[in-house]
Amino acid sequence: MSEATDGTSGPADTGKFERDRARVESGFWPKIRRLAAKVPFLNDLVAAYYCALDPKSPFQVRAVLMGALAYFVLPVDIIPDFIALFGFADDATVLYGAVKTVAKHITPEHREKAAAAIAMLET
């Protein structure tokens, strides 16, 4: 059994994690570069990315975040991102739920890395 996001035990699905990770690794930064100015939750999104990649984060935390990030990266979702005002509503909801679930694991170090990466995008 593995550690779940709230400290309890729960099953781990490493296959899904690896599929989500592959999606995120191939699509996260290209999508961020394209849409950074339009994503109202950019800081949380990038901090979640760094937490999901951090081997010190518990596997279940990384899996929850990687699933939410994979949803963000997917080109087709419930509400297409190009729809004004509502395009990121479903992405924000999924990310908000994931971040709330694992908030104590997103560290100041993850947030600092996120701020540095965002600053690099703006230059």
Image (cartoon, helix red, strand yellow):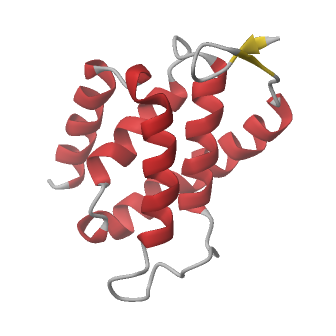
Give the image location of residue 61, x and y in percent: 58, 26
Camera-nearest residue between 57 and 18 = 57
Q: Is residue 18 left or right of residue 75?
A: right
Give the image location of residue 32, x and y in percent: 39, 59
Q: Is residue 82 above or below residue 66?
A: below
Q: Is residue 96 left or right of residue 112?
A: right
Q: Is residue 71 above or below residue 49?
A: below
Camera-nearest residue between 99 and 23 = 99
What residue sits 62% from the left and 65% below the top?
A: 74
Camera-nearest residue between 93 and 58 = 93
Give the image location of residue 121, x and y in percent: 24, 52
What residue sits 43% from the left and 50% below the top?
A: 96
Give the image location of residue 100, x and y in percent: 43, 38
The quarter of the picture where residue 10 lies is: top right
What residue sits 26% from the left and 63% below the top?
A: 40
What residue sits 45% from the left and 28% below the top?
A: 51
Q: Is residue 29 above or below residue 40?
A: above
